[in-house]
Image (cartoon, grey):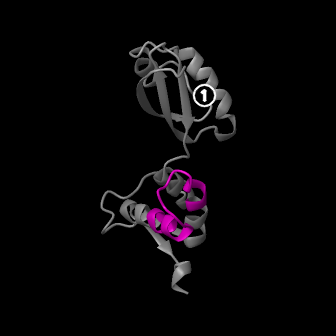
Amino acid sequence: MAKEVAGYLKLQVKGAAANPSPPIGPALGSKGLNIMEFCKQFNARSQDKGGQVLPVLITYYTDKSFEFVIKTPPAPVLLLDAAKIKLGSAEPNRLKVGSVTWDQVKQIAETKMADLNAFDENAAMKMIAGTARSMGITVSGKAPWES
């Protein structure tokens, strides 16, 4: 018989660095879930992605058990890494703080494709380019679909 879902939790945790301190401890503890068990499982499954911010969707059940899915890092985090900057622009329409190439946008789009609601690579690239634009990062070069 299937377990009854009690709810969902969304967290953003650094890969291979989960510990019971806030925000993980209070979020899981308030639902009555085993915090240390989550930390052990998460750290084991995210060993190869150490240091990256990873969104986690936790499904918890009425019997206090849980399952979780680790998503790909957020697009802004990947764009900041690609542009080699620390923060986006406070005024993205006036002040540009970095630049990425279409090849870098394509690589980020391929990484994020599973979590984006885009049918093809060009649509995913347009979404990533839009995120870059809203962060004050310019995309240099000519778009691949404009050739």
Examine the structure image and report whether residue 116 is included in the region drawn in magenta.
yes
**Residue 89 position in % (x across, y down):** 36, 59
Residue at the extreme bottom of the image, as rendered: 147
Q: Is residue 111 above or below residue 34?
A: below
- Which of 90 and 67 lies nearest the eye of the viewer? 67
Residue under label 1:
42
Asked whether the viewer can see residue 85, the reply is no
Tell which of 61 and 51 is nearer to you: 61
Q: What kind of residue is marked 1?
A: Phe
**73 and 8: which is toward the camera:** 8
Q: On the rendered structure, is 132 left or right of 122?
A: left
Disc 1 crowd rating (10 Å Cα; few below 14, some 14-19, many 20+) is many
Judging from the image, what secondary structure is the residue with disc 1 in?
Answer: helix
Q: Is residue 57 above or below residue 73?
A: above
| Image quarter of residue 134 | bottom left
Who's the residue at 60% across and 55% down the image?
111
Please check the rendered image and state whether residue 57 is part of the magenta-colored stretch, yes or no. no
Stretch in magenta: 109-128
Say whether residue 104 is left or right of residue 80. Answer: right
Which quadrant is the C terminus positioned in?
A: bottom right
Q: Residue at x 40, y 56 (%)?
A: 88
Q: Residue at x 44, y 15 (%)?
A: 62
Above or below residue 110? Residue 33 is above
Using the rendered image of the protein, determine whether residue 53 is visible from the camera's viewpoint: yes
Q: Main secondary structure of the magenta part?
A: helix
Q: Position of residue 6 (x, y in %)?
A: 41, 21
| Figure quadrant of the N terminus | top right
Q: Where in the figure is residue 144, as x and y percent of width and height?
A: 56, 79
